[in-house]
């Protein structure tokens, strides 16, 4: 029995080793994707080939699965931008399968839910049923600072269609972005996709640090956006 057990372990290790060996470097690539870094042409497709070639063992590593999904998602997004419909459809279907697999291991991964929403929107445009992915992203990670800039912009674009709890999370996220000093990004979100929600967004800034509020008001003033930021008096020098 011991000999048989040892043989089984040896065979399993020989099958699983390629995916274990790839996990570390692939995790680094996934971190760069989460940070929204750009890659040289061909880099991610090469990585996808390597990930696809790794044997699928019964016990798949969550880290490997997440990296595999994120690489496939970025490749699919780039394929959709190239508008090669046949190839893009194949890549999108592959990415959807890998995202579902990754979420089965990590159902609380708010970034994967956000990327699932992004892929669905890129492929099919706005559909109410797709919002469940965005709702899940906020439900599983309402204060994920490292994805807030991207997620807040995407959520404000469909704000009226969101559930009330998700809307509240989006507004809190906006105020946290300002409070964290990302005033340029917050201003761009409000001036653009969030303009119809400006009163609610501005009201949320009442609890934000005064220095951050002033910096935010200055950015808006220089962009000739006339709004009142709570607790901040307009300074004529900002308009010069």
Image: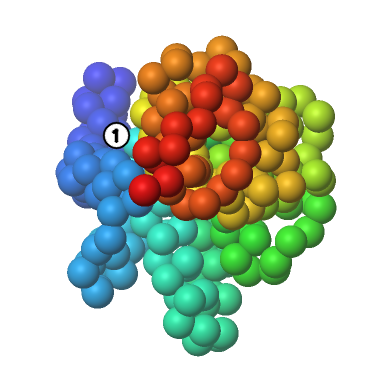
Q: At which x and y percent is residue 216?
A: 45, 33
For residue 183, above or below residue 124? above
Color scheme of the displayed model: rainbow
Q: Is residue 10 left or right of residue 31?
A: left
- Tell me, yes or no, if residue 109 can be seen here: no
| Residue 4 picture quarter | top left
Residue annotated with mark 1: 8
Label 1 Cα neighbours within 10 Å, binned few <14 / some 14-19 / many ≥20: few
Q: At which x and y percent is residue 100?
A: 58, 47
Residue at position x 70%, y 66% in the image:
125
Q: Is residue 108 left or right of residue 163?
A: left
Q: Nearer the viewer, residue 83 or 215?
A: 215
For residue 192, above or below residue 218? below
- Quadrant (top left, top right, bottom left, bottom right) of the N terminus: top left
Q: Nearer the viewer, residue 71 or 158?
A: 158
Q: Nearer the viewer, residue 102 or 170?
A: 170
Q: Is residue 181 left or right of residue 221?
A: left
Residue at position x 72%, y 31% in the image:
200
Q: Is residue 166 left or right of residue 81?
A: right
Q: At which x and y percent is residue 58?
A: 44, 40
- Tell me, yes or no, if residue 6 can be seen here: yes
Q: At which x and y percent is residue 49?
A: 30, 67
Residue at position x 78%, y 59% in the image:
127
Residue at position x 47%, y 67% in the image:
76
Query: How many labels were placed on the picture?
Result: 1
For residue 190, above or below residue 167? below
Circle 1: element type: helix
Q: Nearer the viewer, residue 102 or 54?
A: 102
């Amino acid at each position: 029995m011991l000999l048989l057990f040892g043989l089984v372990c040896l065979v399993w290790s020989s099958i699983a080793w390629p995916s274990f060996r790839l996990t570390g470097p692939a995790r680094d690539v996934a971190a760069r994707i989460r940070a929204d870094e750009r890659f040289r042409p061909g880099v991610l497709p090469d990585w996808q080939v390597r990930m696809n070639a790794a044997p699928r063992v019964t016990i798949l590593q969550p880290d490997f699965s997440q990296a595999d999904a994120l690489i496939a998602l970025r490749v699919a997004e780039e394929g959709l931008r190239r508008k090669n419909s046949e190839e893009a459809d194949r890549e999108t279907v592959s990415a959807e399968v890998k995202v579902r697999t990754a979420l089965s291991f990590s159902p609380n991964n708010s970034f994967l839910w956000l990327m699932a929403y992004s892929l669905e929107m890129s492929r099919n445009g706005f559909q109410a049923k797709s919002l469940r992915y965005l709702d899940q992203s906020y439900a599983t990670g309402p204060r994920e600072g490292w994805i807030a800039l991207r997620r807040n912009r995407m959520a404000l674009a469909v704000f009226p269609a969101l559930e009330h709890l998700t809307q509240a999370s989006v507004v809190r996220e906006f105020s946290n972005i300002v409070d964290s000093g990302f005033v340029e990004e917050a201003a761009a979100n409000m001036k653009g996709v969030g303009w119809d929600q400006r009163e609610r967004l501005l009201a949320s800034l009442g609890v934000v640090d005064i220095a951050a509020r002033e910096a935010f008001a200055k950015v808006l003033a220089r962009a000739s956006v006339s709004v009142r930021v709570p607790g901040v008096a307009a300074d004529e020098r900002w308009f010069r």
